[in-house]
Amino acid sequence: MTRLEQIHKDIDTLPEEAQVLLANFIEFLKYRYLLTAEKDVDKKDQLIDLMQFSNTINWDVDGLDYQKQLRMEWE
């Protein structure tokens, strides 16, 4: 029996009221994760906009090398 089949079987054994609560909870989770995904996309778009504004989107600099140079300067 697959995991999904087991979940379906478990839901079928619940009383009607519990099944309604479970359906409501599933809708809540779908909504919550949809909002989280939208926030992640917004953050990515904001970062790209900032990089385009500061002209660093086409920056041909090796990030690790740049970081290494900064650390050497700060020591």
Image (tube, rainbow, N blue to C red):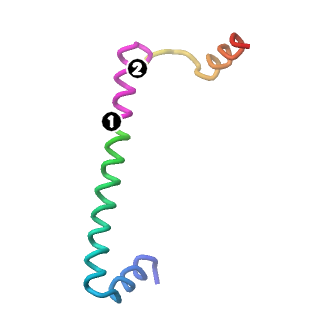
- The kind of secondary structure the magenta stretch mainly shows is helix
Q: Element under label 1?
A: helix
Q: Tell me if label 2 and label 1 are in contact, CB under 8 Å.
A: no
Q: Which residue is mark 1?
A: 42
Q: Residue furthest right?
A: 75
Q: Toward the viewer: 61 or 43?
A: 43
Q: Toward the viewer: 50 or 15?
A: 15
Q: Residue furthest top?
A: 73
The part of the chain drawn in magenta is 42-56
Categorize mark 2 by other alpha carbons within 10 Å: few (<14), some (14-19), many (20+). Answer: some
Q: Which residue is mark 2?
A: 51
Q: Residue at x 41, y 76 (%)?
A: 4
Kindly report which numbered mark, 2 or 1, lies closer to the viewer in this rendering. 1
Q: Where's residue 23, x and y in %?
A: 28, 72
Position of the C terminus, as image quadrant, is: top right
Give the quadrant of residue 10.
bottom left
Q: Where's residue 18, x and y in %?
A: 30, 81
Q: Amino acid at mark 2?
A: Met
Q: Is residue 48 above or below residue 33?
A: above
